Image (cartoon, rainbow, N blue to C red):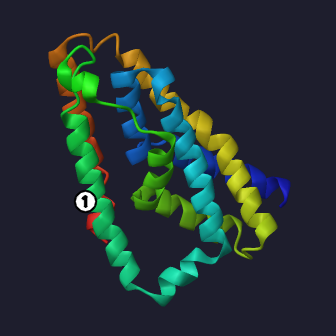
Amino acid sequence: MSLELVIALTAFAFVSSITPGPNNLMLMASGANFGFQRTIPHMLGVAWGFCLMLTLVGVGLMQLFDAFPLTYDILRIVSVVYLSYLAYRIANAGAPSTEAGRKSKPFTFLQAALFQWVNPKAWTMALTAITVYSPSRNMEAVLAVALVFGLVNLPSVSAWAALGQQLRKLLDSPKRLKAFNYTMAVLLMGSLYPILTM
C-alpha cells in the first residue's frame, strides 16, 4: 500500500470514526452515566469488533450476502429493533444513586463487539473502506485496512467516552441526567434514518 493511500485511508478512518453515529452516541452516554473507566470494555469492544468485521467483510463475507439478498432485509430489521431497544435502555437509565442506576450496567466488551454487526454506520464504513482502499481484497491489503482502522478508531471512540465523562459534572442532578439520556436516545433513533430510507 502506497504512502498516499495510507494517508487517504487514515483520513477516512478518522473522519468516519470520530463523527457521530450509534457507537459514539452510546459511548458518550456510557461515559456520562458510568464514567470513563467503566466504559473501557465498551470502547475496546467497538474497536476490536469493528476491525474483525472489516476483515471478514474484506475476505468475502459480502459474497454470502450477495448470494442471499434476503439477509440484507433481515439485517436491517434486526438493526432497527436492537437500536430501538438500546435507545429505550439509554432513555430509562437512572442516576447512579438511584435503584435503576444501580441496576444499569455499561456494555461489556463482547456486547460492544457484537453490536458492530447490527450497526448501520459500521456496515457503511466497512463496505466503503474495503471497496475503496482494498479493491483487490487480498489478505495483506485487507489486514492493512483493518490495522489502520484499529489504530485510528480506538482513540476516536475514546474521545466520545471522555466527553461523556466530562459531561458528568453538568449532569449532577437527576433532571439534567434524564434530559441528557432522553436526548441521547432520540439521537440514537435518529441515526436509524439512513437505514429506514434505503
Tell me the SS state at disc 1: helix
Front one among 53 and 194:
53
Total numbered labels: 1
x and y percent of residue 52 in the render? 62, 57
Relative height, residue 13 to residue 128 (above, below): above
Q: Residues within 10 Å of mark 1 (few under 14, many from 20)?
A: few
Q: Residue at x 49, y 85 (%)?
A: 66
Front one among 152 and 89:
89
Q: Quadrant of residue 32?
A: top left
Q: Residue at x 20, y 43 (%)?
A: 88
x and y percent of residue 192 in the render? 29, 56
Q: Quadrant of residue 126?
A: bottom right
Mark 1 is on which residue type? Val
Direction from residue 159 to residue 89 in the image, left or right? left
Q: Which residue is mark 1?
A: 81
Front one among 16 and 110:
110
Relative height, residue 102 to residue 128 (above, below): above
Outermost residue on the left side: it is 175
Outermost residue on the bottom side: it is 67
Direction from residue 113 to residue 20 in the image, left or right? left
Q: Residue at x 38, y 23 (%)?
A: 34
Direction from residue 189 to residue 120 in the image, left or right? right
x and y percent of residue 64 in the render? 53, 82
Q: Residue at x 73, y 51 (%)?
A: 147
Relative height, residue 190 to residue 130 (above, below): above
x and y percent of residue 7 in the render? 75, 49
| Residue 111 is at least partly visible in this image | yes
Q: Quadrant of residue 141?
A: bottom right
Image quadrant containing the N terminus? bottom right
